[in-house]
Structures are given as C-alpha cells and as structure tokens.
C-alpha cells in the first residue's frame, strides 16, 4: 500500500481537536506546573496526531500499525495525566469526564483501525 493521506482520517482530525483542548486546559494551570504536568500533557496529546500522521507515511501495514499503537499509548498517557490533574485539583470532574469521553472515542477509533490492519495482514 502506498502513502496514506493522514488529513482524511477522522482519528487524526479528532486528535488535533483534543490537542487543542489540552493546550487550552493547561493554559489555566498554575505557572509552577509549566514544566511538570502541563508539558507532559501537551507532549502526550501532540504525540497522538503526530504518530498517526507519521504512520501514514509508512509503506507497510505493519509499520502503520506500530505507529497507531504508539498513538494509542499516548492517548492512554493523556487519560492518566488528566486523572492526576483532577485528583490534585487542577481539573474539575465535569471537564475531566468530557475530555475522557473525547479520548475514549479516539482510543476506540485507533483500536478499530489497528484491528482492521491486523485482519488485512492476516488475509494476505
């Protein structure tokens, strides 16, 4: 399979929107968190669409799948960091639930695409 256009993937578009939400969220965090949880959240959130895009550039299905797995790991990392943010009082429960809902949609989309790729690899 040739290079895929990452811009056409709903998971890429959704993860860009999530990253935007994370940037807006951490802007409200205290300045002392700038090099702690804030930078970790931004790095992990940015990693999701970045790895989807990078995976799209790979010629093999196995490589694409590997980058999707990295993106999925980053999504789980963001979820964990959001829970920690809530637990230490930086994020209200309602907003936490909203962001986790968005994240879970992305996680499911990535998993579905991984399974689709696995099935296409098996049938070759």
Image: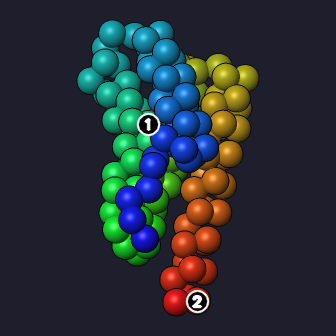
Residue 109 position (above or below residue 105): below
Which secondary structure lies at badge 1? helix
Residue 43 in view (yes/no): yes
Q: Residue at x 44, y 20 (%)?
A: 23
SS class, disc 2: loop
The answer to whether residue 64 is left or right of residue 105 is left
Left or right position of 104 against 83: right
Q: Image point 55% across, 28% down: which residue?
A: 17
Where residue 40 sits: x, y (%)? 35, 34
Picture quarter containing residue 36? top left
Residue 63 seen in render? no
- From the viewer's side, name the closer residue of 107 and 55: 55
Decide: few, some or many residues near mark 1? Use Cα within 10 Å; few <14, some 14-19, many ≥20: many
- Residue, x 66% and y 36% (percent of image)? 102
Q: Indicate the quadrant containing the N terminus: top left, top right, bottom left or bottom right.
A: bottom left
Q: Which residue, given by chain and number where applicable, does mark 2 sit on?
A: 123
Per the image, the residue denoted by label 1 is 45
Residue at coordinates 51% horizontally, 18% vertically from top-left?
25
In this view, the residue in front, 68 or 89, is: 68
Location of residue 41 in the rendering, given as x and y in whole percent from the top left corner: 41, 32
Q: Which percent across, then down, holds residue 21?
A: 54, 22
Residue pushed farthest front? 2
Q: 74 or 53, which is in the foreground?
A: 53
Taking depth in this image into account, of 9 and 37 the one nearest to the observer is: 9
Dot placed on the residue nearer the N-terminal end, 1 or 2: 1
Q: Indicate which disc residue 21 carries.
A: none
Measured as percent of width and height from the top left, residue 111 is found at: 60, 62
**In the image, 92: left or right of 73?**
right
């Amino acid at each position: 399979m040739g290079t895929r256009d990452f811009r056409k993937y709903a998971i890429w578009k959704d993860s860009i929107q999530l990253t935007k939400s994370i940037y807006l969220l951490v802007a409200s965090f205290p300045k002392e968190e700038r090099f702690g949880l804030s930078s970790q959240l931004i790095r992990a959130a940015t990693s999701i669409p970045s790895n989807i895009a990078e995976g799209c550039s790979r010629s093999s299905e196995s490589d694409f799948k590997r980058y999707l797995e990295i993106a999925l790991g980053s999504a789980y990392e963001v979820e964990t960091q959001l829970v920690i943010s809530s637990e230490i009082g930086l994020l209200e429960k309602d907003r936490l639930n909203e962001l986790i809902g968005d994240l879970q949609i992305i996680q499911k989309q990535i998993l579905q695409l991984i399974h689709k790729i696995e099935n296409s690899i098996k049938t070759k």
